Image: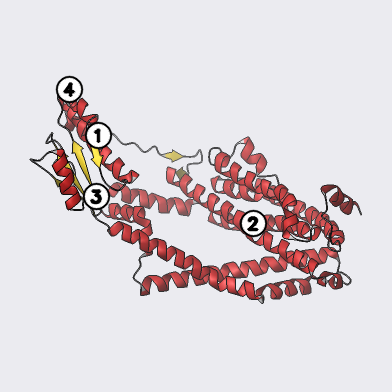
Amino acid sequence: MNHLPLIIKREYLTKVRNKSFIIMTFVSPLIFAALIAVVAFLSQLNKDKLRTISVLDETNMFEEVFTNTEETKYTFIEGVDLETSKELVKNNENFGLLHIVKSQDSIDIVDNVRFYSDESPSLSIMSGLESTIEKKLSNVKLKINGVDLAKIEESKTRINIAQENFTGEQTSKIDNILKLAFGGAAGYLLFMFIIIYGNLIMRSVIEEKTSRIIEVIISSVKPVQLLMGKIVGTSLAGLTQFAIWLVLGSVILFVISSIFGISMAEMQTPQQEMMQQTMENPEVANELQTAFQSFFNLPLFNLVLAFLFFFIGGYLLYSSLYASVGAAVDNETDTQQFMLPIIMPLILAVYVGVFTVIDDPHGTVSTVFSFIPLTSPVVMLMRIPFGVPIWQQVLSFIILIGTFTFTVWIAAKIYRVGILMYGKKPSYKELYKWIKY
């Protein structure tokens, strides 16, 4: 008799009714939302802070160069020496003093610029000051050498090379950015899901083994059915928790932003600036339009379908490995010696995806690792946005499912013997003997 549906139902209900599962399901979004709200609030406070920088310019060259912003205000000091200027800055509680010493020529000015402050200035502040002074001195040098700055500005040329394949389909640099974003997000999501819920399956097996409940269950259920039921049931519980997190997280963030007036957009200042430029700069508007066009040019149906298949296949493959480790040991401490062979292929897949697929998605290394079952879920998901032939995707998925079937068979043999072994830490040699039984 096939007990698999009953085992899946039991595992699912056992997980979702567990107190710790329920608490973490509803508390985790609150913690996550609170963390984001705190970061957004602190970012808003930091942005609202106005820093006043006093400038003692002995060269009288930079008065029109430093312009006030929402975060920085510049005040110029005249007719006093350096020590008096320092006292004025301290008394007025200004952020700092920029001292530009008068020199014979602009070359000497470079070595005679100092910034005084009680607090250590941030890298962005110092970079902004240096950039402003460098641009002004460069223009001064060009004028001294008889160069017309207006002609230089007129001579500046911007080029955007049009991309098109041999079939006539137009692409752009933004296409590659979107492909990298989708591939990276898909690979990272799979990686995190395997780590979090694979450990959940392993702990579930260890708990049943130590509580001796498994001795009753195993008498009427085949090890393969019990293992598959545990994997599928726990996976469904994980998906349920993940879906609840998404819904509750969105609702909580909306409520927090509405009640406390905290704008989550404060954490997206670069995006806000880009949108503002879009309203003013036609070139940026064209780039944004190209980005939308590039998004719809992606093989969305293929991406979504491949993501579902490889996500599920990769998770099931690693879940069977986690379950076999849980059956072989009595406690989580003993799992460490068996975890490295499981984690290393995942880390290798992420490494290949980030450093190889991005550079050459159709190269030998990327292609080979997209067919190796332990790395193919991550690597293939990162390759597909760049246009992988359907036959390669199907072949990779078939190999993945075949490996999963073989892994479940191996894991069931370990599960059959290890689930009844207590008080002994098994070695790799003993695991091999269990597989041969």
Q: Residue type at mark 1?
A: Glu
User: What percent of the width, then of the height, locates residue 1?
Assistant: 87, 73
Q: Nearer the viewer, residue 411 or 215?
A: 215
Q: Which mark is residue 134?
A: 1
Q: Earlier in the sequence, mark 3 or mark 2?
A: 3
- Residue placed at 37% from the left, 73% from the top? 258
Q: Earlier in the sequence, mark 3 or mark 1?
A: 3
Q: Earlier in the sequence, mark 2 or mark 1?
A: 1
Q: Nearer the viewer, mark 3 or mark 1?
A: 3
Q: Residue type at mark 2?
A: Ile
Residue 332 visible in the displayed image: yes
- Using the image, determine if residue 75 lies above or below residue 305: above
User: What percent of the width, then of the height, locates residue 225?
Assistant: 81, 66
Please give left or right for residue 223 compared with residue 236 in the image: right
User: What percent of the width, then of the height, locates residue 191?
Assistant: 61, 54
Q: Which residue is mark 4?
A: 145
Helix, strand or loop for disc 2: helix
The residues bearing labels 3 and 1 have C-alpha atoms spaced at a distance of 22 Å
Q: Which residue is mark 3?
A: 95
- Residue placed at 62% from the left, 40% from the top? 366
Q: Residue type at mark 3?
A: Phe
Disc 3 residue crowd, few under 14, some 14–19, many 20+, Cα 10 Å: many
